[in-house]
Amino acid sequence: MNKAKKRNKLGRPKKLTPAELRRGVEAYFASISYMEPVTREEFVVLNTDPKTGAVEFLLDKMGHRAVRNVPVLGADGKPLMRLVYTQAPGDYGLCDFLKISRDTWDRYGRAVELLEERRRQGTEDGGLGSGRPTEMRDGEPAPCGRDEDTELQEARDYAEIYTLARGRVCAYLESAAEVKGAAKGAVFKLERIYGLSEKKDVTISAGGNIEEYLRAIGGEAEY
């Protein structure tokens, strides 16, 4: 492959525009999640004696105190809501929803890096606009009419969408790592799939603190 063709491969037009990608990512997460109110159980009180303070509770058929779910209020006095996933979010599920390959998705994340690489190659070749944005015409690179600042901003937009999307997946895995029976799998994904690991002897139990674990391996909720 000659340098001209290689440069075009690195900077080939994206399958989705940044706006389309952002909408697609939001639609993916919306399709597998919903919001529900945070509630807590409390006993149902029938009456309280104003003199003695004795409380009369409603009893169920078994003679036990009946309970009901009541909304949990936040510091602002509004009901708290929690995000619930109907299935675990992940890169492959996202790619399937967007109808793109995993390679394409990863290239969105490396958009700035790939753009800078293509521009360096253009400068080194000493031609084709010395690194200016190009597109293919009749099999050969040609100026595409976009200034470099516009193309750089587009690359940054792709990378930001990619980072935020994977950060949401990592946030889900953080929560899953706190759940008994799910911690091992969640930590494995954070380490092996999402790159939040170093060669350190760190262990985390099902009841461990995921934030302390991430600090220990030098990880973040995003990457």
Image (tube, rainbow, N blue to C red):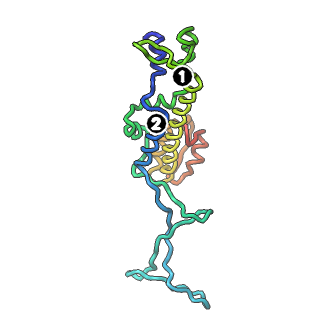
Residue indicated by mark 2: 21
- The mark lying in front, picked from 1 and 2, is 1
Residue at 44%, 78% (x, y): give it: 66
79, above or below 193, in the image: below
At label 1, the amino acid type is Arg
Q: Secondary structure at mark 2?
A: helix
- Image quarter in which the C terminus is found: top right
What is the quadrant of the N terminus in the image? top left
Q: Badge 2: how crowded within 10 Å, few (<14), some, or many (20+)?
A: many
Residue farthest to the bottom? 51
* Depth check, front residue: 223 or 101: 101
| Residue 146, numbered label | 1
Q: Amino acid at mark 2?
A: Leu
Relative placement, left or right, of 209 versus 6 is: right
Pick the residue in front: 152 or 83.
152
The residue sitting at the front extreme is 145
